[in-house]
Image (cartoon, rainbow, N blue to C red):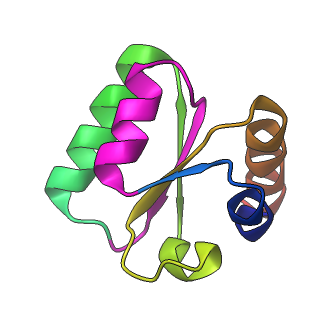
Amino acid sequence: MLGLCARAGKLAYGVDAAEDAVRKGRASVVVMDADAGPNTRKALKNACKSHGARLLEAANVGRATGKDSRMAVAVLDAGMAARVAELFDQEN
């Protein structure tokens, strides 16, 4: 599903962009790579907690979106964000 969001242009790539999207209310779901470091985890966790966004963790987030070096993405479309969260809940 993240690949579809990427092709639709509905993702903010990278930790800073994801955090900014959450703070501005443009994203309600952030997907963080399972290999993210402690500073990345803390920044995203704090932003999501204070702005009511959901933080999900998955392996190989960058590869799924076509940008291997990215450790986090924010889903910018509400419908797509709901579907990403739904699929995540089904798998976990």
Placement of the N terminus among the 4 image quadrants: bottom right
Q: Is residue 26 magenta?
A: yes
Residue 2 is at least partly visible in this image: yes
Q: Is residue 40 left or right of residue 35?
A: left
Residue sitting at x 60%, y 29%: 28
Residue sitting at x 50%, y 54%: 73
Quick check: 56 above or below 65? above
The image shows a total of numbered marks equal to 0
The residue closer to the viewer here, 79 or 84, is 79
Q: Is residue 53 left or right of residue 17?
A: right
Quick check: 50 above or below 16? above
Residue sitting at x 72%, y 59%: 92
Residue sitting at x 15%, y 52%: 39
Q: Position of residue 22 (x, y in %)?
A: 45, 28
Q: Is residue 70 magenta?
A: no
Quick check: 61 above or below 14? below
Q: Is residue 88 left or right of residue 16?
A: right
Residue 59 is at least partly visible in this image: no
Q: Position of residue 27 (x, y in %)?
A: 57, 31
Q: Position of residue 56 (x, y in %)?
A: 55, 50
Q: Quadrant of residue 50?
A: top left
The boundaries of the magenta stretch are: 14-35
Q: Quadrant of residue 79?
A: top right
The furthest residue to the left: 39
